[in-house]
Image (cartoon, helix red, strand yellow):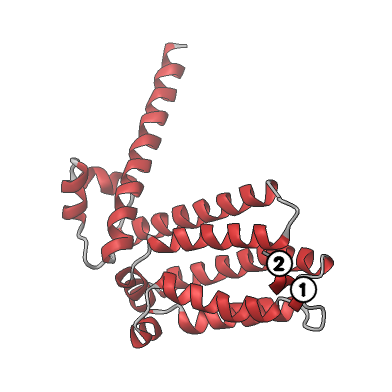
Amino acid sequence: MRSGKTTSNSSTTEHSARRRIIAGARRHFLAFGFRGVTMDDLARELGISKKTIYAHFPSKVALVEAVVLDKLSDIETKLERIASERSGDFLTELHTVLASLTRHLEEIRPPFVRDVHRDLPQVFKLVENRRRDLARHHFGRLLSEGRKEGTIRTDVPTELVIEMLLAAVQGIMNSEKLAELGLTPKEGFSAIITVILEGAITQTGRKKP
């Protein structure tokens, strides 16, 4: 029994250490880019040895992937919570979803987008695939509900609106285009949403408070 308890405590400690490393890396990588933060910097900031970090993550790339997955998981969890607390009003729920996504994007700064886009195409592809799944699931459901209550136009297929949204995000939410336009990820996303989704709202929906 004592051996089992020791193993459980050890597992909990390992999980806690891993979570702490991911949290620290997330704060620094998303703000400054993973190229701008060394493993020495991270170890010093966390007050642990670099060896301890490598005991949990075999490489810096593995840690970046863990940070991205952690971020995506947070977004998905929040969107699922919003969906489970449906207000029954399309525009209210849409604004809640967009506000949540905007807050999440505030954490992601241009250096991180630049580094991932240039140096880690496999991670960038992972983000694109998960983004597509999220859009189809959550915005697909929202737009369908909006059509039922007369807030979203019925002359444009829901799938087309989502594909237009994804195409705009894919074309703009990369380091080169954001830099060219002088936008942060948050600003770029907000502009895309404004243009695409407002165009899908009916005149009746526009008159709602």
Question: Disc 1 marks which amino acid?
Answer: Thr
What secondary structure is found at the residue carrying circle 2?
loop
Residue type at mark 2?
Answer: Lys
Residue 32 x/y as whole percent: 26, 64
When the figure is inspected, residue 34 is found, relative to residue 55, above or below; the finding is below
Q: Are marks 2 and 1 in contact (CB under 8 Å)?
A: yes
Q: CA distance from mark 2 to mark 1?
A: 7 Å
Q: Label 1's element?
A: helix
Residue 170 located left or right of residue 47: right
Residue at 68 percent across and 63 percent down: it is 91
For residue 41, above or below residue 11: below
Residue 183 lies, in percent from the top left, at 37, 79
Q: Residue at x 24, y 42 (%)?
A: 52
Label disc, if present, on residue 208 of the rendered structure: 2
The mark found on residue 120 in the picture is none
Q: Position of residue 178 (x, y in %)?
A: 38, 81
Which residue is disc 1 drawn over? 204
Taking the spot 59% from the left edge, 77% from the top edge, the residue there is 166
